[in-house]
Amino acid sequence: MSMNNEKDIISPTFFEGLLAYKKSGHSLTYINGYYSCALRQKGKCKDNREQSFKAKELDLKFANLLDKWQIDEKTMENEILPEIRKVSNKVKEEGLKVIRKKQENMQITIDAMKKDIKNKKKISSHDLAYIKTLFMDMMRSYFPCCLMAHAGVGLISLHDKDKSGFTTMFKRVYISDTGRFEYIELEGLGEAVLNFLETKMPGFTKRLGIPVRGFGLKNTNLSEAMIFFKDNNFRNGLSYSIYRSKHSEDRYFELIFRLSKNGNPKQIILLCEQLLYFHWQRAGAYFRNFVLVTDNNFDRIKVGKNKKISIK
């Protein structure tokens, strides 16, 4: 029996790009309480067979579908969460070892840059490139921790009444033109999580009653899956990974390299120290702050006594 009713549903359940028509592959977008073809909203689709759907009704229908993946409290507390905590701690410790070593190398490089400034020399572009390499290596070492946290939140939601937290494990949810759920395409992380659940509850995935597809990940050990995703630069972990392209890496360093050509050397050093003294548990928030750093607000950047960075 379903635990949901329409008044409990907070629409939209489906974030942009998640929901798609099976036949055309067109994404649906949420507008004015309805899901409808995104291309039709732009005047680029004339397929009248693709219906629009009241969001509350489709979201409720999907919530009732996900109820088939309900995990009882005993199983969650005794079998699922202990394993998640164990793997998370292992991934965290391995990441910290790499981060500390990279921080040491960054400090040595920054000290060399400070020495160059003191001796009235230009900051070496090679040093800046090395700083970038070290920082991205640090973040890649941290990202498996993000993935495990993501997996944990998704898993816990399968014990809750609201299971929408697990939808971030899905790459696409395909529906028919009339609104019947056809199949789910998993993110790599979602496939790893379901493989793990199958070891605890054989047949779990098939409970849903519709096909659930991934790219064929064989790992049932979550820590091994994290290594696999890291080797692939996380492209198979989450399709919206911040490391999917060279452009997404370079955007964090655009200001530093621009300043290196004609900026104040002290500004360059301060920006590099931001990279060195980030608080690793809050790296996601750090990235958001870093994007806010521009030539116009540079004077608002402060480095506290504990080396934490803030933008006043």
Image (spheres, rainbow, N blue to C red):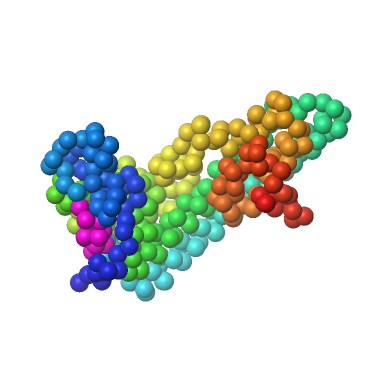
Q: Residue at the location (27% across, 69% down)?
A: 7
Please tell me whether the stretch drawn in magenta is mainly helix, strand or loop. helix
Give residue 79's position: percent from left, percent from top: 40, 67
Residue extending farthest to the bottom is: 74
284 displayed left or right of 107: left
Q: The N terminus appears in which quarter of the rendering?
A: bottom left
The span shown in magenta is 53-65
Q: Is residue 252 above or below residue 79?
A: above
Q: Nearer the viewer, residue 227 or 99?
A: 99
At x 24%, y 33%, the residue is 44
Left or right of 180: which side holds 312?
A: right
Q: Nearer the viewer, residue 285 or 7?
A: 7
- State whether residue 174 is above or below residue 72: above
Q: Tell me where residue 306 sits by quadrant.
A: bottom right
Q: What is the x, y in percent for residue 298? A: 68, 41
The answer to whether residue 218 is left or right of residue 46 is right
Residue at the image point whose x is 42% and y is 53% from the top? 221
Residue 173: x and y in percent read 27, 48
